[in-house]
Image: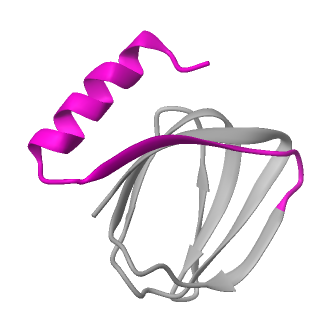
Amino acid sequence: MTDPCFDAFRTQALAAGFTEVLERAWAPDTVVGPHTHPFEASALLVAGDMWLTVEGSTRHLLPGDRFELVAGVLHAERYGPQGATYWVARR
């Protein structure tokens, strides 16, 4: 179930030219190896924690942290023991 603040996130993202906005929830301790996406992404972590590795640099993200990825950038993800949920806008 999405938080009422998701509506504000969605409205702002669409106004900024993003074409898709969704909530992604990840199971505890999920590891997603190196991969790319054909879209740009702008996200806000809203629950749990995750580690995002982009171009050899790893960030530990907590609720309230934002991250952005350009299309085609190689990255990897690791989710914490309670999993993680983020809202993401794509274009």
Q: x and y percent of residue 37 in the render?
A: 48, 79
Which residue is more in the foreground, 51 or 2? 2
Q: Position of residue 80 (x, y in %)?
A: 81, 48
Q: Is residue 25 left or right of residue 75?
A: right
Q: Quadrant of residue 48?
A: top right
Residue 90 spot, x, y in % from top left: 34, 58
Q: Is residue 83 above or below residue 37?
A: above
* Image quadrant where residue 32 sits: bottom right
Please tell me which residue is depicted at 58% across the width and 87% down the height of the picture: 56
Looking at the rendering, the stretch of residues picked out in magenta corresponds to: 1-30
Q: Nearer the viewer, residue 6 or 46?
A: 6
Image location (x, y in percent) of residue 89: 35, 50
**Outermost residue, front side:** 19
Give the residue at x 25% y 53%: 19
Q: Is residue 67 magenta?
A: no
Q: Is residue 61 above or below residue 4?
A: below
Question: Residue at left 88%, top 45%?
Answer: 28
